[in-house]
Image (cartoon, grey):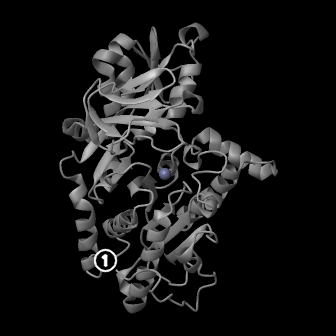
Amino acid sequence: MIPIDQAPIPTTPRSTTPDPERLATSSLTDIKRVIGRVGGPSADHESPPGPTVIIVAGQHGNEPSGVHAAVRVLQSLRTAVEREPGCFRGEFIALAGNVEALRTGVRFIETDLNRLWTPGAIDETFARTERGEPVSAEQREQRELADEITDAVLRSRGPTFLLDLHTTSASSRPFLAVEDIVRVRELARAIPVTGVLGLEAMIRGILPDWFNTVGDAGLIFEAGQHDDPASIERHEAAIWLLLAEVGVIGHSAFAARLEAARSTLEPFSRGLPRLLEARARHSVSPEDGFRMRKGFENFHPVVRGDLLAGDSAGTIRAPMSGWLFMPLYQPQGEDGFFIARRASRIFMRLSKVLRPLKLHKLVHLLPGVSRSDADVDAFVVNPKVARVLAHEVFAMLGYRRYREHAGVGVFGKTAEDMHRAWYALPEELRNPRRDQSRSS
Ligand SMILES: [Zn+2]
């Protein structure tokens, strides 16, 4: 691979936009929203119709690795396309996530951009920006980013895919966060690292959650530690493999690059299941004084009861056995750690077969299960039933969000549905001070 600072900057006379990659190579202080673009209608290179791949890099401003990777891919792609125009179809566009935070090198300015992608928060951002009302730094970022993504989807001449690039504070093997939607699970096979299912049920408002409602399939790829140069190579490898998998680039024209990308990533899934499921989350607020014990890596195997962390209330132990997932080693953040467990293969196969049958239309016939009155995609259950049977059945049908208190539980397809169904329940059933949230 040519080091980016020695590579010639390709000149594209037909391009109408300045070349923002050039700025990103030296420093991110001048980074722009659109890092670069190849193909698509009205682009500098008029490519045949095909899929669209959207990269979002640096939704967290202290994670510049994805930006550098996107710049490298854009440069190589342009060179390849000039040499052999037929090796590319559709569109590739790389977007910077939190531009202001990337410029200053902080995770976020006022609030975490990658928690703002709930329908409620998006509506608020759009309503405020439309009315010209004051918005937070991240609402401004969100509006611009959402506009760019929506434009790319609207002008696409094929299916649309999104890869959201991140890095972690702790040292980590690379992995994918995979929403439990069959087409998203299938896309995840393009990138040969462990995938973690079910994060969207625990962390509200991540970008693919929204993208999977406007585009075809979106994934989060976590490449490793923030400042590790290897994270850039892994991000780059993931982008190449995705471009090839969906057919934006031809396999033969990029054979060597794809082979290198596979050997960059494949070793990291050794000794781990290919698909894990996030099962427990330890949430953190600033006043907790949360401190993770030193020495844990991402995917460190843990046994129930292992001492993991401490806070002002005492020690924090593993609530179940599995793999420790995303331990928090930075001052900002709301997720202390997760525990992940192996996703069942039978579950994966059955859910693929069962979901298209729309069996959810019959779910209310199960004992102790009724539809929510709130006119949303959610069910109210007797928690006793839920413990025995319903978690598996509901997860199989795509209802992963679950919340319960005392005598009542609610399953929803989306976090919004679950919360709306929950708050439609009589007040006495859902004392918010004593309820528990968990995920199946
Ligand atoms: Zn991140």
Is 157 placed above or below 417 here?
below
Instruction: Report x, y in % for residue 147.
Output: 63, 59
Instruction: Report x, y in % for residue 403.
Output: 46, 22
Is 207 placed above or below 380 here?
below
- Tell me the quarter of the picture where residue 300 sits: top left
Whether residue 195 is visible, yes or no, is yes
Which residue type does callout 1 highlight? Gly
Instruction: Report x, y in % for residue 284.
Output: 51, 31
* Residue most extreme to the front: 294
Residue at 23% of width from left, 72% of height from top?
A: 259
Closer-to-camera residue (44/216): 44
Is 121 placed above or below 150 here?
above
Closer-to-camera residue (334/361): 334
Residue, disc 1? 250
Quadrant where the C terminus lies? top left
Residue at 59% of width from left, 19% of height from top?
A: 424
- Tell me the quarter of the picture where residue 7 sits: bottom left
- Tell me the quarter of the picture where residue 196 sits: top left
